[in-house]
Amino acid sequence: VSAGAQAKIVQALSEIFTEEERTVFRRGKNSKPHTTARNASVSDYLKATGFEAVLGYLYLTDNIERALELVKKGIALAGMEI
């Protein structure tokens, strides 16, 4: 998992998030991390944490389709397609 790649995905998805997803993202991003990233900036690490919070929220609310949609769109919008 790459915090830098996840941060790029979040940047690309910022306009696509619902209001609820934005709230979850902000809460996850603003949480105090108990660890630090070795290969990522603090900013990228916090954005990645927020994105992971959104995916976790969608998983727990049984909205896997939306999680997959965000990941696919984020990869495409960030220009990281294989």
Image: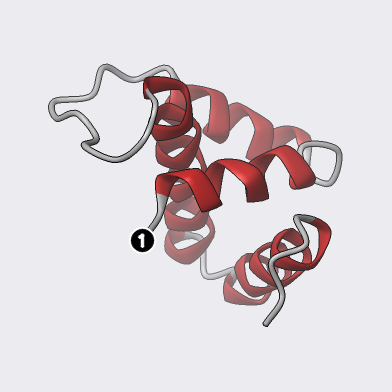
Residue 41 in the image: above or below residue 60: above
Look at 50% across and 32% down and name the residue there. Answer: 47
Residue 10 in the image: above or below residue 32: below
Q: Which image quadrant is residue 79 in?
A: bottom right
Q: What x and y, as percent, mark residue 77?
A: 82, 58
Q: What x and y, as percent, mark residue 52?
A: 44, 49
Closer-to-camera residue (82/21): 82
The amino acid pointed to by label 1 is Val
Look at 39% across and 33% down and name the residue there. Answer: 45
The colour scheme applied to this rendered structure is secondary structure
Q: Residue furthest front?
A: 39
Q: What x and y, as percent, mark residue 66?
A: 69, 67
Q: Which image quadrant is residue 30 in?
A: top left
Residue 54 shows in the view: no
In the picture, the quarter occupied by the C terminus is: bottom right
Which SS class for mark 1?
loop
Residue 12 shows in the view: yes
Look at 76% across and 33% down and name the residue there. Answer: 19
Density class for disc 1 (Cα within 10 Å; few <14, some 14-19, many ≥20) is few
Q: Residue furthest left?
A: 34
Look at 77% across and 45% down and name the residue there. Answer: 12
Relative side of 62 to 10, left or right: left
Q: What x and y, as percent, mark residue 1?
A: 36, 61
Closer-to-camera residue (55/63): 55
Relative side of 63 to 45, left or right: right
The residue identified by callout 1 is 1
What number of labels is visible?
Answer: 1
Q: Residue furthest bottom?
A: 82
